[in-house]
Image: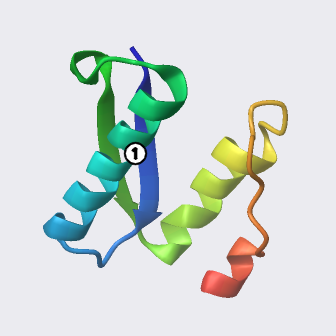
Amino acid sequence: MPHVSVKMLKGRSDAQKDAAAEAVKEALMKALGAPAAYISVSVEDYTPKEWQDVFKTEITDKPDTLRIAPQYDPKGMI
């Protein structure tokens, strides 16, 4: 395995989500040498208001797991 959960704002098409998931899968195959059969990718949609809680839980509260930090204030999205 790896499993990756992609979280984003609502509004993107299924085709865009599928393309993003495929790109993540390909990147994991290349970077980790993981076989495609062992990779899973999910996509979760949020409103800007919902994103405030997710940002805190997934980003602000977990600095030790964050590999690339966002360069924006999520409050600017609402």
34 or 13, which lies in front?
34
Q: Is residue 39 left or right of residue 4?
A: left
Q: Which residue has dot 1 on it? A: 24
Q: Going 30% across and 49% down the picture, which residue do you hit? A: 21
Q: Is residue 73 left or right of residue 42?
A: right
70 or 39, which lies in front?
39
Q: Going 79% across and 70% down the picture, which residue do you hit? A: 71
Question: Could you say where residue 63 lies in the image, as x and y percent from the top left?
Answer: 83, 39
**Amino acid type at image mark 1:** Val
- Above or below for 57 versus 47: above
Q: On the image, which quarter does residue 27 sit in?
A: top left
Question: Could you say where residue 64 lies in the image, as x and y percent from the top left?
Answer: 84, 31
- Above or below for 10 versus 55: below
Q: On the image, which quarter does residue 12 sit in?
A: bottom left
Q: Going 43% across and 21% down the picture, which residue do you hit? A: 2
Question: Could you say where residue 42 lies in the image, as x and y percent from the top left?
Answer: 31, 41
Quadrant location, the C terminus: bottom right
Q: Is residue 75 left or right of residue 34?
A: right
Question: Could you say where residue 29 lies in the image, as x and y percent from the top left?
Answer: 40, 29
Q: Going 61% across and 83% down the picture, which residue do you hit? A: 77
Mark 1 surroundings within 10 Å by alpha-carbon count, few (fewer than 14), some (14 through 19), many (20 or more): some
- Above or below for 28 versus 47: above
